[in-house]
Amino acid sequence: MSKPKKSVARQTRRDVRASSRDHSKLIASVDRSLPQAPTPVRREPVKPLTAGQKRYDVAIASKDIIFGQGPAGTGKTWYAVQKAAEAYKAGLIRKIYVTRPAIEVGEGMGFLPGELDEKFAPYLIPLKEAFCEALGSGHYEYCLKAGVIEPVPLAFIRGRTLKDAWVLADEMQNATKSEFKALLTRIGENAKFIVNGDTSQIDEKIGGSSGLEDAIRRIGNHSQVSVITFGRSEIVRSGLCQDIVEAYEGPKPK
């Protein structure tokens, strides 16, 4: 009678050891699949290059909601990403949310392949490039997987409370009034919203009524809100970019 009992006990011990080995392999596999965070690319704090960026820098340091408006190439998005990355690395915030309205040329988001985050990815390419410069591509991918950087389509932001975080809202000249209300009313404790846009590039699909212009009129004079306007002379992308902006925003050619 004792032999069967010993056999069962022996087999049980073997099953436990095998299960433990399998679990260890699984854990090791998961660990290897997670990207390692390398040393950040940018080591020194970012410094403003223009008068507009200096005002922007002061506003980011002192206000809760910052509107940055002005032509392409003035560094609105790039500078906001660098400052957000610095705040995260300094331990001042836990998360960085990024959003923008889904206004497309041609096919809509619903026709793009993949899940929602994959559909939204093309809209965030300019922010991704700036994040990779601030953090390094490996650290950026790590932050995405860990949920430190969270892309949120503007249409899905309702009902959330965004706290202990910075929210970077880009290309917001194409957001509607209702989208702006949904976004701005999400602000929670220890949150900072940086909202950028270029009102000269309002898309016809929103009927020429920009939520960005409306929001600035409504709350632009609030004590915890700052509106920074960049001029064409402050374009830092390239001299040619400045010439192109002036060609499109100046007098119409005859």
Image (cartoon, rainbow, N blue to C red):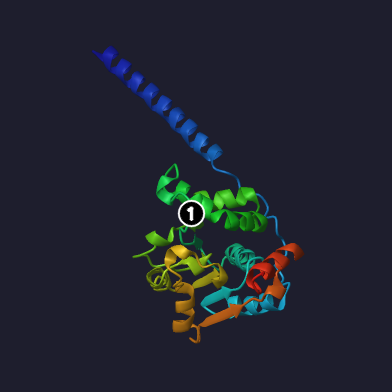
Q: Is residue 103 left or right of residue 245?
A: left
Q: Position of residue 227 (x, y in %)?
A: 56, 80
Which residue is rendered at x = 40% and y = 48% of the image? 110
Q: Position of residue 140 (x, y in %)?
A: 59, 52
Image quarter hosting the C terminus: bottom right
Q: Position of residue 103 (x, y in %)?
A: 47, 59
Q: Residue furthest right?
A: 239
133 vs 121, nearest the viewer = 121
Which residue is rendered at x = 29% and y = 12% of the image? 3
**Amino acid under disc 1:** Gly
Pointer 1 local density, CA inside 10 Å: few below 14, some 14–19, many at least 20:
some
Residue 185 visible in the picture: yes
164 vs 136, nearest the viewer = 136
Image quarter hosting the N terminus: top left
Q: Which residue is mark 1?
A: 147
Which residue is rendered at x = 49% and y = 80% of the image? 216
